[in-house]
Structure formats: C-alpha cells, structure tokens
C-alpha cells in the first residue's frame, strides 16, 4: 500500500523549476526558484539515517517544504512521531495541506504543514530531531546560522550545500543524493552540539 501511495504522490506534473512567486504585499520582490524533491532522493535520505527514521521519538522537519512531497513521503514510510513542513508561500502550504487526508501514515501523528518564516524568532523548532534544508533562493550563511541557532542539541541538520557552523567537530561525513530533479550532489550533514 505504501508503494501505491508514493506512486500517486509523485505522479503529477512537476512545477516549472522557475516558478515565479511575488509576495502580495511586495510585488516588486525577486522571483522564487522552486526545485521539487525526488522520490529516490527522499529514499536516500531515509536510508542514510535509517536509525533516526525508525525511532518513534523522531520529529522530522523540512524547512522550505514547498508542496509537501518530502514530508508526506517520510510520514508514509517511517514510524516516527511526526513529519512537519514549514513553507513561506501560502499557496504551497495550501496545496500540501490538501493532500494530508488522501494517505495513510506510519508516523504516530499526521503530517503538519505551517505557513511561516522558519528564520523568524517566533517559529519554534525545539522538538526537531532531524531537519532538511535545501532552498535555492535563501541558501545563505546568515539563514543557515539562524536556522542552526534554533535547533536543539543533538539535532541532525542536512543541507544541499556545505555551510560551516561554529564548530568543525559538528560536521559529519556527507552522502551523495539526487534529492531534486536538478542533479545529484553531496548532502552536508551536521549534528548540533556533538563533538566527534
């Protein structure tokens, strides 16, 4: 049944990679570049962190969750506590939320999608066990640092591009993953507050 659900989840016309989003209150803002995750890429992340995605206490976050494919996939496949998506664009959150009732999940709690700026001090991620962040538009050191500062000790932070947190000892060996339709690349892995 999970395989059929995943077939349905990934059976849609992909959004244009260069989808344009302009904030309603600021139409002059720059375009948003959108890259969708692949089924194989999500499976690669789950496989590389099998013990984390098998733990009933795990709370997974996708920071910049778009249309929700990764969050829904993780919730369907993994017996974790909950998978959560945080997305800035309201239309993407609405789309993700519209899919929740269509599927059955192994996670203890249904997936959750929130429209928010994950860098805002008002958004709490203190329950995170593992966080995935791959955002073409806002992948800057200051955004990574803000997100990193929100994470609890022991939290795993996965990024598409290398970024250096305060301590070199928090960086782990990465892995190659084709998480988006763009290309395969090395995922950078960090563990907050843990020395080797």
Image (cartoon, rainbow, N blue to C red):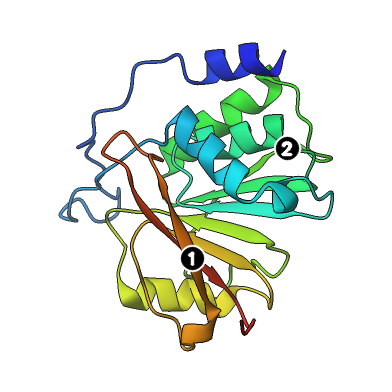
Q: Is residue 196 above or below residue 49?
A: below
Crowding at label 1, few (<14), some or many (≥20) Cα neighbours within 10 Å? few
Q: Nearer the viewer, residue 82 or 121?
A: 82
- Quadrant of image for the N terminus: top right
Determine whether the residue tagged by mark 1 lies in a helix, strand or loop.
strand
Could you classify mark 2 by the number of other residues whose Cα lies within 10 Å: few (under 14), some (14-19), or many (20 or more)?
A: many
Q: Image quadrant of residue 141?
A: bottom left
Q: Is residue 129 above or below residue 13?
A: below
Q: Secondary structure at mark 2?
A: loop
Quarter of image, res 66: top left
Q: Position of residue 9 (x, y in %)?
A: 54, 20
Residue 21 visible in the picture = yes
- Residue at 83% from the left image edge and 55% from the top image edge: 57
Residue 117 visible, this orientation? no
Which residue is painted at 32% across and 39% down in the image?
A: 35
| Image side of residue 73 versus residue 18, left or right | right
Residue under circle 2? 78
Q: Measuring from the top left, give residue 107's x and y in whole percent.
A: 78, 38
Q: Which mark is residue 173?
A: 1
Q: Residue at x 42, y 31 (%)?
A: 38
Q: CA distance from mark 2 to mark 1?
A: 23 Å
Disc 2, disc 1: CB below 8 Å?
A: no
Q: List x then y, in percent, for residue 130.
A: 63, 59
Pick whichever of labels 2 and 1 is earlier in the sequence.
2
Residue 42 pos. (x, y %):
52, 38
Which quadrant is home to the C terminus? bottom right
Horizontal side, residue 115 vs residue 14: left or right: right
């Amino acid at each position: 049944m999970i395989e059929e659900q995943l077939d349905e989840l990934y059976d849609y016309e992909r959004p244009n990679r260069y989808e344009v989003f302009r904030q309603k209150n600021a139409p002059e803002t720059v375009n948003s570049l959108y890259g969708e995750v692949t089924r194989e890429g999500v499976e690669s992340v789950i496989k590389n962190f099998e013990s984390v995605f098998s733990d009933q206490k795990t709370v997974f976050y996708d920071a910049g969750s778009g249309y929700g494919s990764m969050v829904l996939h993780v919730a369907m496949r993994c017996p974790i506590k909950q998978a959560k998506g945080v997305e800035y664009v309201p239309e993407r959150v609405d789309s993700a939320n519209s899919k929740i009732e269509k599927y059955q999940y192994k996670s203890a709690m249904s997936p959750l999608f929130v429209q928010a700026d994950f860098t805002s001090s008002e958004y709490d991620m203190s329950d995170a066990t593992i966080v995935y962040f791959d955002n073409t538009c806002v992948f800057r050191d200051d955004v990574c640092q803000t997100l990193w500062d929100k994470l609890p000790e022991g939290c795993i932070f996965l990024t598409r591009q290398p970024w250096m947190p305060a301590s070199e000892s928090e960086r782990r060996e990465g892995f190659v993953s084709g998480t988006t339709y763009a290309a395969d690349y090395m995922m950078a892995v960090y563990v907050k507050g843990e020395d080797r």
